[in-house]
Amino acid sequence: MGFCYRCGSPLEPRVPAGDDQLRECCTACEYVHYVNPRILVSCLIHSDTKILWIRRGLEPRRGLWAMPAGFMEQGESLQQAAVRELREETGLEIHPGELQLSVLSSLTFVDEVYIVFRCHHAEVALTAPSAEILDVAWLEEPEVPWGQLAYPDTEPFMRNFYREVSVAKFGIYLGEFTRLQHQLMKVPTDVSP
């Protein structure tokens, strides 16, 4: 960053009093500039045994398949951010109150918190609303181009979600993704649709 948001003076890395982490601190007003994880939200929309997928139109991972997702904006709730991203990437309009929690996960290697919601919606015809998305498709599990996922580490989770959709019994998962591994654990509570 280089300069203080408050007074414009230079920043220097040091451990502030009472802290144990190296932080960017202002050399003049002593303001501590914290850098915190970003919040990434996603929607898994299912209709019967189909799930709504997008094919990315922008880098990184242009042309590969993923679930609709993006970052929270200032002033949004988690659910509002998720439905905004869904609308921007698929054109599908849903109400934030329709969302059910599916996953809470830490992506420590990129300093992000990842929150996934799920929602049932009748299958409707959709077209990519912008150049950001090349395609929008409702896919059965055998139709998914598993070798072309934008984020291959999500494959086990997505396959599990297909299993949940097929029996209409859903869990809530707590997980952590690192550069080397991922782990999702079901929270010991069953949640019905």
Image: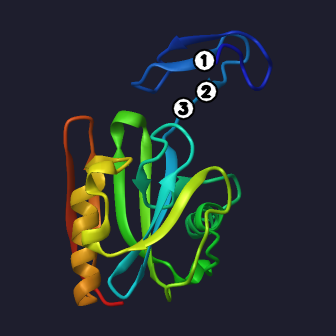
Report the quarter where the C terminus lies.
bottom left
Q: How dense is the environment of label 2, judged by Cα within 10 Å: few (below 14), some, or many (20 and up)?
A: some
| Disc 2 to disc 1, C-alpha distance | 6 Å
- Asked if labels 1 and 2 touch by Cβ distance under 8 angstroms, the answer is yes
Mark 3 Cα shell of 10 Å, populated few (<14), some (14-19), many (≥20) = few
Choose between 188 and 149: the one closer to the eye: 149
Label 2 secondary element: strand
Side (left or right) of 81 relative to 190: right
The answer to whether residue 11 is above or below residue 134 is above
What is the C-alpha distance between the residues marked 1 and 3? 11 Å
Going from N to C along the chain, the mark reached first, 2 or 1, is 1
Locate residue 59, reporting x and y percent. Answer: 53, 37
User: Is the residue under label 2 in contact with that under label 3 (CB below 8 Å)?
Assistant: yes
Name the residue that disc number 3 marks: 35
Looking at the image, is mark 1 or mark 3 earlier in the sequence? 1
Provide the residue designation for mark 2: 33
Q: Which mark is residue 25?
A: 1
- Direction from residue 193 to residue 88 in the image, left or right: right
Coloring scheme of the render? Answer: rainbow
Q: In percent of the image, x 27 and y 72: which residue is there?
A: 141
Pointer 1 local density, CA inside 10 Å: few below 14, some 14–19, many at least 20: many
Contact flag, marks 1 and 3 (Cβ < 8 Å): no
User: What residue type is disc 1 on?
Assistant: Cys
